[in-house]
Amino acid sequence: MPNVNFQGRDIISIEDFTQQEINYILDTSRSMEPIAKNGSDMLKRKILATLFFEPSTRTRLSFEAAMLKLGGNNIGFAEAEIASVKKGENLADTIRTVQNYADIIALRHPLEGAAKLAAEFSNVPIINAGTGAEEHPTQALIDLYTIRKEKGKIDGLKIAVIGDLRYGRTVHSLAYALAKYNVELTLISPETLKMRREVLNIIQTKIPVAEEPNLEKIIPQTDVLYVTRIQKERFPDAAEYAKVKGTYRIDLKTLKNAKKDLTILHPLPRIDEIVPEVDATPQARYFQQAWNGTVVRMALLALVLGATK
Amino acid sequence: MSDKELRVSKIKDGTVIDHISGGYALDVVKILGITGREKRVMTIAINVPSKRFKAKDIVKIEGRALNSQEVNRIALVAPHATINIICDYKVVEKLEVKLPKVIEGIVRCVNPACVSNSDEPVSSKFYVKSDEPLVLKCHYCGYILEKADVLQQL
Ligand SMILES: [Zn+2]
């Protein structure tokens, strides 16, 4: 057994984990597949608090389902009901209160660094369920798990990431995660939404990274195409948005020259980046990610709470 | 210009800040809150040829001492500066400015969405990744601050 120990650890940033540790999480996730179907009482009498300071129904349901499948319980709030927060309570105080009710906390927060701050005040483990535009480590683990499940490996793949690479929090965590493997990464985005400098600086020292505005040019070589949402409100003006909107729409025509075994992923929800006609192609694997999300989160909960080694 | 010529402006009591990175003397003066209307004798030399650096700046201020907060701020824009305390035309103390590995509370994170800028009971915290050129990394959000970001706040 590798020398890894997750019990009591915070899951804040994918950067905090070695490749060996990530592989261990992915292996544990695979072992959760049958448990996700049949249920278990591994986390009986354990309580997960889901503190969602901004809405993300999918992520919250995924965490809660993961906890229930392991026999545990959930408490928590979603954005609409945050009475104490509306009264102006800060995050540090909320955490110092909630840690008395729960064994582990999953935190979603609009501010960057919120999970790190929460962990400094909490005496129970914090799982970052998405903070600011910065990081979403559990989504990155799900992406890696999906890639490995689909391709049987991560090393050696040519991976293209397309869309909003500046504000899209999932791509930052994914980029950090991929940089721990031996992959070639191509980044495709409009000029205004290019990958953030601090992320680029780190990943470029580890793996070959190319910035390429033209998807058509690289699609024939690509093994995994990771598509993210481009949100209109991120653009400085409407004309700029209109200009890039069509360029980053994946339809059957886009895929004409793609590999037969290309894997298309999307963290969902999508808007119109992937046209529905693509859903029926064998390359579309984004709906499988939701299932994978549950098993990966089950693995994290079980590991951090020491129910599995 | 040689050191000999600079002696023209020798001060009696005060502070000489030497080895300021070339071109940053005016920022150092700004950090000290000096406007030039204080009726103090002051000399500012900019881009003086230097052995240690290609060019350095020097600031001499009559009748002014520095506190540690000011020294830390100077370290951000002039990490290799030396500070000489002058008493009766003689150097009585020599201080090396040194940028610590971690900087807490002196500068704000420029990321408006950073949790350290909100109403939380923490102060800002940065890791010094490089002192020349200055690269600071926010402990909380990971944002990179450069010299220009810091200068804007001084
Ligand atoms: Zn910050």
Image (cartoon, coloured by chain):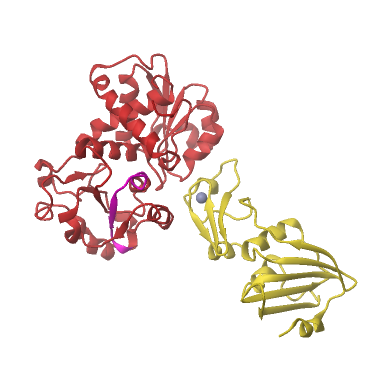
Residue B123 at least partly seen: yes
Q: Is residue A184 magenta?
A: yes
Q: Is residue A265 magenta?
A: no
Q: Is residue A180 left or right of residue B106?
A: left
A168 or A40, nearer to the observer: A40
- Up/down of B147 relative to A130, above or below: below
The chain painted red is A
A99 or A11, nearer to the observer: A11
Residue located at (48% from left, 49% from top): B142
Q: Position of residue A92 (x, y in %)?
A: 55, 35
Q: Which of the 4 image quarters holds residue A283?
A: top left
Q: What is the span of residues highlighted in magenta in the rendered image?
A: A177-191
Q: Which of the 4 image quarters holds residue A220?
A: bottom left
Instruction: Work out which quarter of the rendered image holds the C terminus of chain A and state it.
Output: top left
Q: Position of residue B33 (x, y in %)?
A: 71, 67
Q: How many numbered discs sit on the rendered protein?
A: 0
- Up/down of A241 relative to A13, above or below: below
Q: Position of residue A249 (x, y in %)?
A: 18, 54
Residue located at (51% from left, 56% from top): B110
- Up/down of A266 relative to A242, above or below: above
Residue B111 at least partly seen: no
Q: Residue furthest front?
A: A1
Q: Position of residue A53 (x, y in %)?
A: 42, 37
Instruction: Work out which quarter of the rendered image holds the N terminus of chain A and state it.
Output: top left
Residue located at (65% from left, 57% from top): B99
A206 or B56, nearer to the observer: A206
Chain B painted colour? yellow
- Up/down of A244 relative to A94, above or below: below
